[in-house]
Image (cartoon, rainbow, N blue to C red):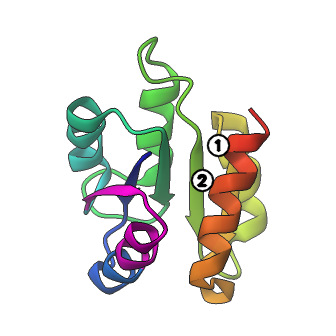
Amino acid sequence: MKVLIVEDDSLLVEMVRAKLKKDGYDVFSACNGEEGLSRVEECVPEIVLLDINMPIMNGFEFLKIIKNSDRFKDIPVIMFSSLGEEEDNIEKGRALGASGFLIKSQLSLNDIHIKIKEVLNSR
């Protein structure tokens, strides 16, 4: 299964990548929304893990574009939100089509694997 991580925190990306590879996923990454759109075209992931606050193109802009794409609109997206912003971000993300949310400050690597399975099983 292909997972695309769109996140500008390289340390977080490497930690998540290592965990997901260990769990048997093919993992791709991008450091901003614009690069993420290119990676979606290249690898066509089964799920996207998406940061909200990134340079060049933020997560909401990325989400809006892929959810308006006939080719990619059915790809589930799990958004990363920062503590303190989660309520507004979750509401906005849901309105744009996000399938799930993880709060970065409360995140464990096992939570990511569990959330991916939860989102994919609910489809």
Q: How many marks?
A: 2
In this picture, is 32 found above or below 11? Answer: above
Q: Which residue is mark 2?
A: 78
Residue 27 appears in the figure? yes
Label pair 1/2, CB-CB below 8 angstroms = yes
Residue 44: percent from left, percent from top = 33, 32
Q: Earlier in the sequence, mark 1 or mark 2?
A: 2
Choose between 112 and 22: the one closer to the eye: 22
13 to 60, vertically: above or below: below
Q: Which residues are magenta?
A: 16-30
Residue at the location (75% across, 42% down)? 121
In space, the residues marked 1 and 2 are separated at their CA atoms by 6 Å
Spot occupied by residue 67 in the image (x, y as percentages of width and height): 52, 26
Label 2 crowd (10 A; few <14 / some 14-19 / many >=20):
many
Q: Quadrant of residue 98?
A: top right
The secondary structure type at the circle numbered 1 is loop
Horizontal and vertical percent for residue 93?
Answer: 65, 47
Q: Which mark is residue 98?
A: 1
